[in-house]
Image: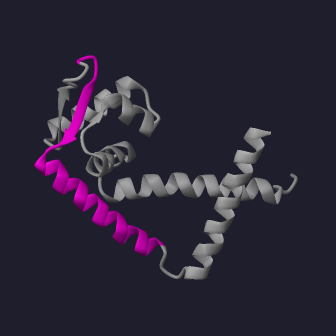
């Protein structure tokens, strides 16, 4: 069996860490990652069309509609036709949804603080610098 090249190990670990982080917080708050994203996005952006939510989350329309209906059934958001174009549906948080989203944001801040226990500010900066360089390299490769 040949040893895994360091580059492969780096990107495997990076990808796994990102995936695990998204899933772990959602489990921590007993919601799906997409439910968390919808609630927080609506809190930050206000009333938003289903098509904008679908693009932001990177999911198909049927999946988004199912998620929105679940949150609506829980009393966390409401839907209405876009008065400017009734082909589109808008979603917005209810007062209960607003409180829930605010609670999620506070819980996320606390969760992040716990995840960073034992990691110095310098170590965090090194990781940020590496990620920025990878993103810049990606852009350069795509544009060449």
Locate residue 6 relative to residue 61 in the image: left or right: right
Residue at the (30%, 51%) spot, across then down:
44
Residue at the (77%, 53%) spot, across then down:
8
Foreground residue among 49 and 74: 49
In percent of width and height, residue 108 lies at 35, 63
Q: Which of the 4 image quadrants contains residue 47? A: top left
Q: Is residue 86 above or below residue 139?
A: above
Q: Which of the 4 image quadrants contains residue 38? A: top left
Foreground residue among 52 and 22: 52
Q: Is residue 135 above or below residue 48?
A: below
In percent of width and height, residue 79 lies at 18, 31
In percent of width and height, residue 69 lies at 22, 31
Locate residue 91 relative to residue 51 in the image: left or right: left
Residue at the (26%, 34%) spot, across then down:
68
Q: Which of the 4 image quadrants contains residue 70? A: top left
**Extreme residue toward the right, this view:** 2
Residue at the (43%, 39%) spot, across then down:
56
In percent of width and height, residue 93 lies at 19, 44
Q: Main secondary structure of the magenta part?
A: helix
- Queried whether the magenta region covers residue 95, the answer comes back as yes
Locate residue 141 relative to residue 78 in the image: left or right: right
Colouring style: one colour
Q: Is residue 60 above or below residue 11?
A: above
**Extreme residue toward the front, this view:** 84
- Queried whether the magenta region covers residue 116, the answer comes back as no
Which residues are the magenta region?
86-115
In which quadrant is the C terminus drawn? top right
Number of numbered tags placed on the structure image: 0
Locate residue 52 relative to residue 115 in the image: left or right: left
């Amino acid at each position: 069996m040949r040893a895994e090249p360091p580059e492969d190990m780096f990107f495997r670990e990076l990808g796994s860490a990102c995936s695990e982080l998204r899933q772990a917080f959602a489990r921590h708050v007993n919601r799906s990652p997409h439910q968390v994203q919808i609630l927080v996005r609506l809190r930050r952006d206000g009333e938003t069309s289903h098509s904008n939510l679908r693009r932001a989350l990177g999911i198909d329309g049927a999946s988004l509609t199912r998620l929105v209906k679940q949150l609506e059934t829980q009393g966390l958001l409401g839907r209405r036709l876009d008065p400017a174009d009734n082909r589109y549906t808008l979603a917005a948080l209810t007062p209960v949804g607003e409180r829930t989203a605010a609670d999620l944001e506070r819980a996320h801040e606390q969760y992040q603080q716990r995840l960073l226990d034992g990691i110095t500010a310098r170590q965090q900066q090194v990781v940020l610098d590496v990620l920025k360089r990878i993103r810049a390299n990606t852009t350069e490769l795509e544009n060449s």
